[in-house]
Image (cartoon, coloured by chain):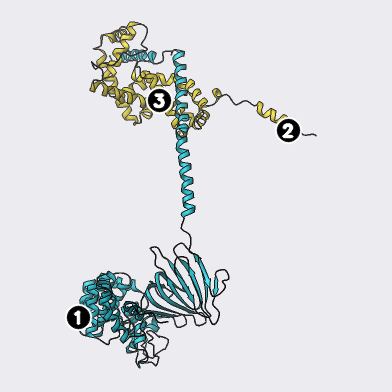
């Protein structure tokens, strides 16, 4: 039996196309990103940017800085990809980075308020508010209420009630014990419930709830 | 009420959720992705471009360093053999004429007739030379980092700059080292610590009898032909080592089997040259080993200087100065000097002077104090102690060394003119003394052939 011509083998080899990055698993994407593969980072963006954006939005509310923070999360991922030992935990890793960056942003905001970097101490108009005016006003009021709690308490509230994380995941993401997470969550909840009653824009939400209950 | 609150909270959470999960304008998302890719490229590519000039500069610097290193790197000393043909590292002198080996750093060797050398290792700072047989006269030029080793049998003579004669007799397994100038350290199989040999001293070791001695070659010169050598005064076991030491300007180091070390020296012997430690003759009066092993003079004789210092420290230096015997104080002083503890040596010697008045130990201590002070560079104090010794024992065993010491210190502190009378006096008394060459040099006389 004769051997196939060498040139044909070469032609076959060059005809092989790389496995599409879109179909790689999270673990494979992490390995590729650790090697500096920009395509892999692009796929991670496509796969997880909506989630991360949601976490950031929930945590800091409508803000001009949101897209910048989103960039920071993915740049941080690329730099830290070599240290992600469990590639399958990519989702949790990205949420954790987003939460930490959100916490930093919330602290920066407080500092800006303290040093009055804006003429009135009021932050610039936030973007991406809901289309309806009632919803816009309610959301602004809600975040105004949340501005009154500590960053950790606020993030606990957002992770539990907005992102729907289990209490253990909230604790893990915040890097605190489960009991601390529970305590922070309860205090945030109490504070929000107490303060929303003073916000006219939020009363309809409570009244609807009361009406529904009656 | 709680349910109402929970319900209200759920509505608020839903409001936030709807905001968080609101669809994003695809153009905004695409712009974000592109911005990320641009940023990643910007963080990767410009870094290499920015580093390129640095890398080029580093490469050029590296090349320059390499060239400088190759051109200016220290090279090992080289040597030329005159008077015989060298066979690789082996240098054999003919039976009737000497051979000279000249090193590139100015050092030189003269292998006596019949001698055989091997330059085993040429280094930047010196060389390692085996004296395989015969006598070799060595002159090592002193440099800041000079490091020479001369090996004779199991003995290693370490040198930084000096002149000496080294002989090795392989059949008798005996080494003989005469220090003409400077000092060396000898490491050998019988001593724990290196033994310092100074100008005018002679180190001899004999493997067969396991003896190792340092004696004053000046005493040998001055007493040549005398009926009774200095060391023959040793009378009994534990005093042997101190008697040896007394015969030497620096402590004698004699090492051998402890049982042998304890044996008394013969009362006298016929050799013209003093043999400080010829412990090969057995006697019927050998002291018990256990007793001897605790004697400091014997420990010094065995080269166990650190042991003596440790024992003195355990006992307490001031306690020893108050209560130790003369021989122990002398042994302590010797051990301290050998291990570089000049303060401890000085204290022991001063105690000897204070407590033992006109004894021989006390008088020798004056000379040794001169040595200690001279080593410190305190020439005036050294001169006073040499004077003290010469005044107390003008014809003493160490007189030649004391006079030479005074000559050196006066030369160092007051110059050649002041030292000339002392040089004249030295030559008159010790024309063949070890320091005769130095004395002639002070007087401007030509060296003897």
The picture places residue B16, in percent across and down from the top left corner, at: 36, 15
Determine the image quadrant of residue A205: top left
Residue A60: name its quadrant: top left
Same subunit, tags 3 and 1: no
Disc sitting over residue A72 in the figure: 3
> Which chain is cyan in the rendering?
B
Q: Which residue is mark 2?
A: A6
Looking at the picture, tell me which residue is in the foreground, A37 or B165: B165
Q: Is residue B160 placed above or below B12 in the rendered structure?
A: below
Q: Which color is chain A depicted in?
A: yellow
Closer mark to the observer between disc 2 and disc 3: 2
Residue A62 badge: none
The residue to which callout 1 is attached is B355
Name above or below for residue B446 compared with residue A123.
below
User: In the visual, does B43 lie left or right of A140?
Assistant: right
Q: CA distance from mark 3 to mark 1?
A: 86 Å
């Amino acid at each position: 039996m004769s051997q196939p011509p060498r040139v044909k083998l070469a032609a076959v080899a060059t005809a092989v196309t790389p496995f599409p990055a879109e179909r790689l698993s999270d673990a494979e994407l992490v390995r590729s990103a650790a090697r500096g593969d920009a395509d892999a980072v692009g796929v991670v963006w496509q796969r997880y940017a909506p989630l991360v954006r949601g976490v950031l939005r929930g945590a800091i509310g409508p803000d001009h800085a949101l897209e910048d923070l989103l960039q920071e999360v993915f740049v941080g991922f690329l730099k830290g990809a070599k240290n992600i030992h469990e590639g399958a935990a990519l989702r949790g890793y990205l949420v954790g980075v987003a939460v930490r960056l959100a916490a930093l942003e919330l602290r920066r905001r407080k500092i800006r308020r303290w040093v009055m970097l804006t003429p009135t101490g009021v932050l610039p108009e936030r973007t991406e508010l809901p289309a309806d005016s009632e919803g816009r006003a309610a959301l602004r009021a809600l975040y105004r209420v949340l501005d009154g709690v500590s960053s950790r308490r606020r993030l606990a509230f957002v992770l539990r009630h907005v992102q729907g994380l289990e209490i253990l995941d909230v604790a893990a993401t915040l890097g605190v014990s489960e009991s601390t997470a529970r305590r922070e969550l309860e205090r945030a909840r109490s504070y929000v419930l107490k303060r929303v009653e003073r916000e006219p824009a939020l009363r309809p939400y409570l009244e609807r709830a009361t009406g529904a209950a009656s | 009420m709680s349910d109402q609150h929970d319900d209200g909270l759920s509505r608020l959470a839903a409001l936030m959720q709807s905001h968080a999960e609101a669809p994003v304008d695809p153009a905004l998302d695409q712009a974000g992705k592109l911005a990320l890719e641009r940023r990643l490229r910007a963080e990767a590519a410009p870094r290499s471009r920015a580093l390129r000039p640095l890398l080029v500069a580093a490469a050029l610097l590296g090349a320059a360093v390499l060239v400088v290193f190759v051109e200016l790197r220290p090279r090992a000393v080289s040597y030329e053999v005159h008077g015989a043909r060298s066979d690789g590292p082996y240098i054999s002198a003919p039976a009737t004429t000497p051979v000279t080996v000249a090193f590139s750093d100015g050092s030189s060797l003269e292998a006596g007739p019949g001698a055989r050398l091997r330059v085993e290792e040429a280094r930047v700072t010196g060389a390692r030379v085996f004296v395989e047989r015969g006598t070799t006269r060595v002159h090592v030029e002193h440099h800041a980092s000079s490091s020479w080793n001369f090996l004779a049998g199991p003995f290693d003579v370490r040198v930084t700059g000096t002149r000496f004669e080294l002989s090795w007799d392989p059949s008798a397994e005996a080494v003989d080292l005469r220090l003409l100038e400077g000092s060396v350290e000898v490491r050998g199989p019988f001593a724990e610590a290196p033994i310092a040999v100074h100008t005018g001293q002679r180190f001899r070791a004999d493997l067969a009898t396991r003896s190792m001695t340092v004696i004053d070659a000046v005493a040998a010169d001055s007493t040549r032909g005398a009926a009774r050598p200095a060391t023959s005064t040793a009378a009994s076991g534990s005093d042997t080592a101190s008697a040896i030491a007394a015969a030497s300007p620096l402590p004698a180091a004699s090492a051998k089997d402890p049982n042998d070390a304890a044996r008394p020296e013969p009362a006298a012997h016929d050799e013209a040259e003093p043999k400080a430690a010829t412990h090969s003759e057995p006697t019927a009066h050998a002291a018990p080993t256990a007793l001897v092993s605790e004697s400091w003079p014997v420990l010094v004789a065995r080269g166990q200087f650190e042991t003596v210092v440790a024992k003195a420290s355990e006992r307490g230096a001031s306690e020893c100065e108050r209560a130790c015997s003369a021989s122990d104080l002398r042994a302590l002083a010797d051990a301290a000097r050998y291990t570089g503890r000049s303060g401890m040596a000085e204290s022991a010697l001063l105690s000897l002077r204070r407590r033992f008045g006109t004894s021989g130990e006390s008088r020798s201590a004056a000379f040794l104090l001169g040595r200690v002070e001279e080593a410190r560079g305190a020439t005036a104090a050294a001169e006073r102690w040499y004077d003290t010794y010469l005044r107390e024992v003008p014809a003493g065993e160490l007189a030649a060394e004391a006079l030479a010491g005074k000559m050196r210190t006066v030369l160092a502190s007051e110059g050649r003119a002041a030292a000339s009378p002392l040089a004249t006096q030295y030559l008159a008394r010790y024309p063949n003394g070890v320091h005769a060459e130095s004395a002639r040099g002070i007087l401007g006389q030509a060296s003897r052939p």
